[in-house]
């Protein structure tokens, strides 16, 4: 069944130059990720300057718990995106419509579930992470308020997955820009103006996510394209839901284990005190500007490979994989050099405390040289996932970014007697994971068949 569309309405990645298709698709994603990281950074800047280092560390420490729970929703979104991209590439309108409507319902269910888990277990998780007493109360407030708005977060991210899968990444960018401006405006008003502290920052995030969710749902309901939705057609489709979750579950596990390992690392950082944790948070906020474009290239690889695999264009799958790998590596080499050269002014932008500054700078030395290896991991994993083979990347990441990190934190990091031992957990695990991903991509049986039925 043909899907009627124009090239201005969707990014057909089964035609033309792979580099051009990937670049045009990636640019809105990168801009969107920069915008998202910008409002996260402004959030931290305002909290750090107007509330203090303890509040900044509280917001940063809370992020690891948030990301861990969100990883399951990200997995479902990835599964939906892969399925939708392949149906779109195959021009299968009937199953494309079923997949889109099922995705929206899955978003609501996932949002409610994550909200419940977050509200129930956030305090226990903070205590388990050895959160310092002067951070605990504010971190708890931030998490409780944040999770109240989780349904909006889930709905927007799942619909963004639909739009990205059909090549409409510019719409995701538009909604994100509006959401980011809303968030920054409310941050200034609630935290700097009304002095609501971390609660104000969380409320600003909830409201901005609600705005993006409403805009995304409104667009899908108005569009006449095959990926549009109708409230009357939203119902539980067990077959399609199982298909999406089967593809997405390994990605969810992959994201969850990465986040779990980051929780362990955050726990190790917390053991060195609030100021060390504040410096770590400062680095992580800046790090997002370097890493999120890598994730955009990874998503571009998934969508590109998904559409071309669905269309049976395996020659383009291989060319596109090499192209996106080179794009990502070149970018990360440049950004890694920038981080190392300007490490002191970058970290001092967030905190003036000498202990916090030293902690952040040490983190730069441990992670910035590894950016290129991280690009290898995510570019190749994104390409493999595009064919629906989501289990192999999950296993590789599970071994290295969870198993190896746990062993390092438990047995090796204490031997350093400094926070650098904790930070090197990232360096070693990223290098080993990149090596294994290259070997699988070269030898694995993923380059000529899809796992989506």
Image (cartoon, helix red, strand yellow):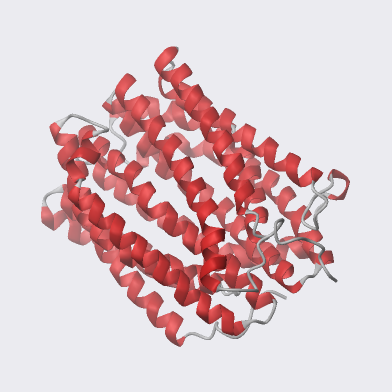
Q: Quadrant for residue 248, please give it.
A: bottom right
Is 450 situated above or below 258? Answer: below
- Residue 195 in view in this figure: no
For residue 292, side relative to residue 317 (left or right): left
Is 68 situated above or below 298? Answer: above
Q: Count numbered badges in the picture.
A: 0
Q: Residue 376, position in %: x, y?
A: 38, 69
For residue 363, side relative to residue 316 (left or right): left
Give me the residue at 58% from left, 84% from top. Answer: 315
Q: Name the residue nearer the viewer: 281 or 58.
A: 281
Q: Quadrant for residue 325, please give it.
A: bottom left
Give me the residue at 56% from left, 53% from top. Answer: 74
Quarter of the image where the N terminus is located: bottom right
For residue 408, side relative to residue 218 (left or right): left
Q: Name the residue nearer the viewer: 345 or 365.
A: 345
- Residue 123 in view in this figure: yes
Q: Quadrant for residue 15, please give it.
A: bottom right
Q: Residue 86, position in %: x, y?
A: 69, 70
Quarter of the image where the C terminus is located: bottom right
For residue 142, side relative to residue 151 (left or right): left
Is 240 situated above or below 396? Answer: above
Give me the residue at 60% from left, 42% from top. Answer: 174
Give me the residue at 29% from left, 27% from top. Answer: 54
Q: Residue 185, position in %: x, y?
A: 50, 24
Is 80 situated above or below 191? Answer: below
Q: Residue 437, position in %: x, y?
A: 40, 75
Outermost residue to the right: 232
């Amino acid at each position: 069944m043909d899907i009627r569309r124009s090239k201005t309405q969707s990014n057909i990645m089964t035609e033309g130059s792979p580099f051009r298709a990937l670049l045009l698709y990636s640019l809105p994603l990168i801009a969107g990720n920069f915008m998202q990281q910008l409002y996260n950074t402004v959030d931290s800047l305002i909290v750090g300057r107007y509330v203090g280092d303890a509040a900044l560390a509280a917001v940063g420490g809370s992020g690891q718990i948030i990301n861990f729970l969100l990883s399951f929703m990200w997995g479902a979104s990835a599964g939906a995106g892969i399925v939708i991209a392949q149906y779109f590439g195959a021009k299968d309108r009937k199953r494309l419509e079923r997949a889109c409507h099922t995705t929206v319902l899955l978003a609501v269910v996932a949002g409610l579930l994550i909200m419940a888990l977050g509200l129930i277990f956030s305090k226990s998780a903070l205590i388990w992470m050895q959160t310092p007493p002067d951070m605990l109360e504010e971190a708890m407030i931030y998490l409780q308020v944040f999770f109240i708005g989780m349904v909006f977060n889930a709905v927007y991210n799942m619909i963004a997955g639909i739009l990205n899968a059909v090549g409409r990444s510019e719409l995701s960018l538009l909604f994100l820009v509006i959401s980011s401006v809303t968030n920054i405006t409310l941050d200034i008003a609630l935290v700097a103006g009304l002095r609501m502290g971390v609660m104000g920052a969380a409320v600003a995030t909830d409201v901005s996510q609600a705005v993006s969710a409403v805009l995304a749902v409104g667009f899908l309901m108005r569009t006449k394209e095959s990926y549009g939705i109708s409230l009357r057609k939203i119902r539980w489709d067990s077959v399609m839901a199982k298909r999406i979750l089967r593809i997405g579950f390994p990605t969810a596990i992959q994201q969850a284990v990465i986040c779990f390992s980051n929780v362990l690392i955050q726990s190790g950082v917390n053991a060195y005190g609030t100021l060390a944790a504040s410096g770590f948070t400062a680095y992580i906020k800046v790090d997002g500007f370097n890493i999120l474009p890598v994730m955009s290239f990874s998503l571009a690889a998934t969508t590109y490979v998904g559409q071309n695999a669905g269309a049976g264009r395996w020659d383009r799958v291989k060319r596109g994989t090499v192209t996106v790998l080179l794009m990502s590596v070149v970018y990360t080499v440049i950004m890694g050099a920038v981080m190392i050269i300007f490490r002191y002014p970058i970290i001092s932008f967030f905190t003036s405390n000498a202990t916090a500054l030293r902690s952040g700078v040490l983190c730069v030395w441990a992670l910035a040289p590894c950016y290129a290896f991280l690009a290898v991991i995510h570019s190749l994993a994104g390409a493999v996932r595009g064919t629906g083979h989501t289990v192999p990347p999950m296993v590789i990441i599970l071994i290295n970014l969870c198993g190896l990190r746990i062993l390092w934190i438990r047995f090796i990091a204490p031997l350093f007697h400094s926070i650098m031992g904790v930070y090197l957990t990232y360096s070693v695990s990223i290098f080993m994971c990149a090596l294994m991903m290259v070997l699988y991509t070269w030898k694995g049986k993923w380059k000529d068949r899809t796992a989506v039925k």
